[in-house]
Image (cartoon, rainbow, N blue to C red):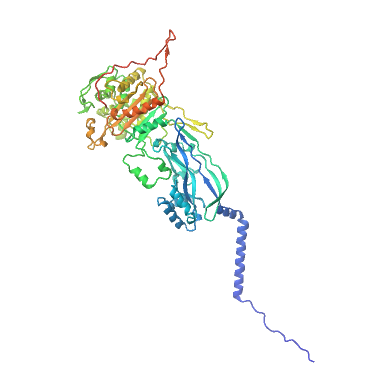
Amino acid sequence: MAKFRAKPQNRPVPKLEPRIAILTAAIVTVLGLVSVRLYYLQVMQHHEMVEMADRNRIRLHRVPAPRGLVFDLRHRPLVDTQPTFDAEIVPEDSPNLSETIERLEGYLGGDDHVADKIAAADEVGRPPYEPVLVAERLDWPKVVALEAHQLDLPGVSLEITPGRHYLYGKLAAHLLGYVGEVSRQDLIKQAAYHMGDEIGKFGLERGWEPFLRGQAGGQEVEVDAVGRRLRVLKEMPDTPGESVVLTIDLDLQWTAEQALQGKNGALVALDPNNGDILAMVSHPAFDPDVFGAGVKSTDWRTLMSDPNHPLQNRVISGTYPPGSTFKVLDSIAGLQEGTLNEHTVYTCGGGIWFGGREFHCWRKHGHGSIALHNAIVRSCDVYFYDVGQHLGVDRLAHWGTQFGFGNKTGVDLDNEKAGVMPSTAWKQKRYHQRWYAAETLSVAIGQGYVAVTPLQLAQFAAMIANGGIRYRPQFVKEVEGLDGGVARSYPPIVEQRVDIDPENLAFVRNAMADVVNGAGGTAHKAQLPGITVCAKTGTAQIVGNKGSLVAGEDEDKMPEKYRDHAWLIAYAPKEHPQIAIACLVEHGGHGGAASAPLVHDVMQRFFQLHPPAPPTPELTEDDETPRPAIAHVLEDDPTDAAGER
């Protein structure tokens, strides 16, 4: 039997298809790259990736600190902090940001431009996942709308934050000021602030920002996929701001506000013994709460276009001719320079011719022959034209500067004006013209180039009251630490001491007392029972529509905007002054008629709160029998005749 032999196999080994090779290489390459990338992410970038994952799940939320409170002199709150609802958005949490913004603006009522606020935050370097404040102090319907539609608003959340609240609305608005959201310029200047923080913008809020602000805290918060808060993991408490105690008395401030109600003007009361501001009113005013929520464009336009300028603090920024209040300065300057004495007599026939024109007295028929005391009491213009001629403008300017005219008082408020105390050098520098003698006559009765602020005139009245000490006006008594103790106090600051002969000062004071209490005085409406008030009225003329001065006697027939401004400066009591006031009623007419009743109301309230102490008895050298203190100079006998000017 033949053996079976296998047939040899001659088939070639199959070759690898080129496309398979290419595919295999591609797969190996991709897997290699993935492996390298995974190694890079999981090993080399482990810490960074964990941090990014945590930032998407865990957020660091900044908690603003409540601002410090503001109290009046008797520690009654004027400004506090209340919880408010704010809307924030984290743009990175919204898959369709434009759609979310459109919905959010719809629920907010269209007043808030969300996209602009996000863009502004990004321009100043907002870190990823940091929320952007888009709406503040939401009312309840908006809060409900956002909460009910939260699933439709990925990245949007409601936050409860401390909001500034002014308890008495417009009361003392120009002094207290207001807060607002930090601007781009604020963020550039002050690195400690973040987008959405509140910062003082005006008044006390701005000046005492470092004390009132406090230190923000923080929270570590876990959020879900759309940025909604799930729980707080860790918390660092905030530190509230320190509180500020003012020199303002709420009761007196309220009385002053009511006195000026419905009028445009200013009233400021000082303690002549230290410069403390007891009350400060500028009307019309504004509501500071409007600014705390981010002032709307419509509200801002209304404020800026108001012809009465409610944002202007007339107490320090309004400059006006002082009118006849300036005659007190004329009297002191003349007595001190020796060009005038208490027996100097000039004749007033209703006007005086000088330089080819007639300068009128307010009293058409004149005052006849009149000496200094009665010239002050009756406010005779012709008398002080003569006083001004003999002094000259440069000596008037010297004494005006001594009393602070033409210089800022130094009060810690923005936009204070220096006013104008003219002189020959001032006119040459300002207008490149020489001074004319006739211009001195206008200055002597508080007209012409001379211009003052109500605070400067109040400071002037205080200097007459205290013997010539010019204190810097202050309105903060102390800053309270968180423990309730005094962290910082503000003692009186003496700016200047003016050397005035006591006899000359006593003479002027006696005349000012008769302006209120004597026959023929122009400020009878400022009288107080049992208290001697010293004062001087003033009527600042307004240039009419044809460029000529409006005569005071025709004011009732004139449009209000052309009527004179009404001034009164006053202090009381005469013997031991406790309060000095300057009051201005714009277009009010005569000072004695318009301003004196307002000063009366404020002083009456002040002495209800602070009854004057009885005179301190003195002992004679011979025995110990007490006797009343003797006034410096006996008051002159009051005379008759008069008008209110």
| Front one among 236 and 508 | 236
The residue shown at (44%, 55%) is 103
The image quarter containing residue 275 is top left
Percent of width and height locating residue 445:
28, 27
Percent of width and height locating residue 573:
37, 22
Percent of width and height locating residue 480:
50, 33
Give the vertical position of 325 relative to 165 (above or below).
above
Residue 417 shows in this picture: no
**Figure disc tally:** 0
**Extreme bottom residue here?**
1
In the rendered view of the protein, which quadrant contains the N terminus?
Answer: bottom right
| Front one among 578 and 84 | 84
The residue shown at (78%, 91%) is 2
**Extreme right residue here?**
1
The residue shown at (55%, 46%) is 219
Q: Is residue 127 left or right of residue 629?
A: right
Residue 598 shows in this picture: yes
Percent of width and height locating residue 637:
29, 16
| Front one among 415 and 275 | 275
**Extreme top residue here?**
622
Give the vertical position of 554 relative to 95 (above or below).
above
